[in-house]
Image (cartoon, rainbow, N blue to C red):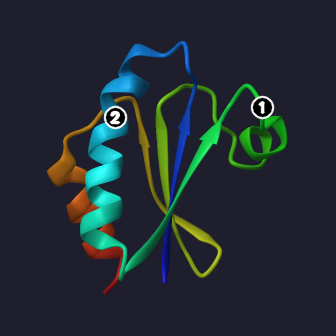
Amino acid sequence: MVKVKRFTAIWCGPCRQLAPIFEQLQIRLSELATFNTIDVDTSPEEVQKYNVTSVPTVIIEKDGEVIERFTGLSSKIAYVNAINESLK
């Protein structure tokens, strides 16, 4: 199974724009992937582990390996395509 991690912050405007997209992806792709939202202000160990330097950042993992990384806001189709590609 693929893991999709969204690094976000309450004060981040693009992060707020990504929230409904992420929720739609979670509903649509819940059979194929797990989705986690990580607040950078309350999870510094996760931020350090994944070397997150900007928000929003979305990381797609498979078998513990980072397959894809998005920094900044991307389109829903870009996330869908990356998730689907990682399932191959």
Horizontal relation, residue 12 to residue 29: left or right: right
Placement of the C terminus among the 4 image quadrants: bottom left
Q: Residue at x 64, y 36 (%)?
A: 52
Q: Residue at x 47, y 31 (%)?
A: 56
In primary-sequence order, the first of circles 1 and 2 is 2
Type of amino acid at the residue the image marks with label 1: Thr
Q: Residue furthest left?
A: 77
Q: On screen, 52 above or below 13?
A: below
Residue 18 badge: 2
Q: Residue at x 60, y 82 (%)?
A: 63
Tell me the quarter of the picture where residue 84 sits: bottom left
Q: Position of residue 11 (x, y in %)?
A: 54, 12
Choose between 69 and 8: the one closer to the eye: 8
Circle count: 2
Q: On screen, 45 above or below 15?
A: below
Q: Which residue is mark 1?
A: 42
Tell me the quarter of the picture where residue 48 sits: top right
Q: Position of residue 22 (x, y in %)?
A: 35, 48
Q: On screen, 43 above or below 81?
A: above
Q: Position of residue 32 (x, y in %)?
A: 36, 81
Type of amino acid at the residue the image marks with label 2: Leu
Give the Cα separation between the discs numbered 1 and 2. 19 Å
Please tell me whether mark 1 sits on a helix, a strand or a loop: loop
Tell me the quarter of the picture where residue 47 sits: top right
